[in-house]
Amino acid sequence: MSLGDKAKDLTQKAAGHAEEFVGKKTDDAELTAQGQKDQHMGEARKNVEDAKDSTHE
């Protein structure tokens, strides 16, 4: 996994966490759900990249 891919995954997870936090504080269910989705997508991308890395070792 390249450093750029790791940064993208981490950024997506962090942005999702921030969206979820703001959504909860403002009672915005849509923003909360979007934040959770972004976190899961970032984690899934990280897992895919980790699996690719483990097959190349």
Image (spheres, grey):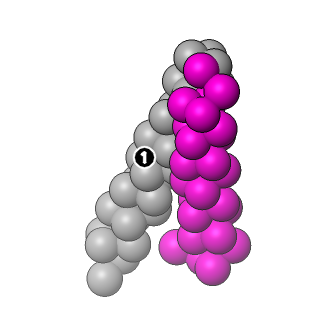
Q: Position of residue 31 (x, y in %)?
A: 64, 25
Q: Is residue 14 left or right of residue 40?
A: right
Instruction: Give yes or no for residue 33 being in the magenta stretch.
Output: no
Mark 1: few/some/many CA within 10 Å (<14, 14-19, 20+): few
Q: Which residue is mark 1?
A: 44
Residue 19: horizontal and vertical position, in percent?
64, 39
Q: Position of residue 6 (x, y in %)?
A: 58, 70
Identified at 60% across, 76% down, the residue is 2
Residue at 39% over, 72% down: 53
The image quadrant of residue 54 is bottom left
Q: Is residue 13 visible?
A: yes
Secondary structure mostly seen in magenta is helix
Task: Tell me if I can see residue 35 in this picture.
Answer: no
Residue under the point 65% across and 70% down:
7
What span is colored magenta in the figure? Answer: 1-27
* Residue 49 in the image: above or below residue 23: below
Residue 22 in picture, x, y percent from top left: 65, 38
Q: Name the quarter where the C terminus is drawn.
A: bottom left
Decide which of 54, 9 is in the foreground and name it.
9
Image height check: is 26 above or below 5? above
Q: Quadrant of residue 35?
A: top right
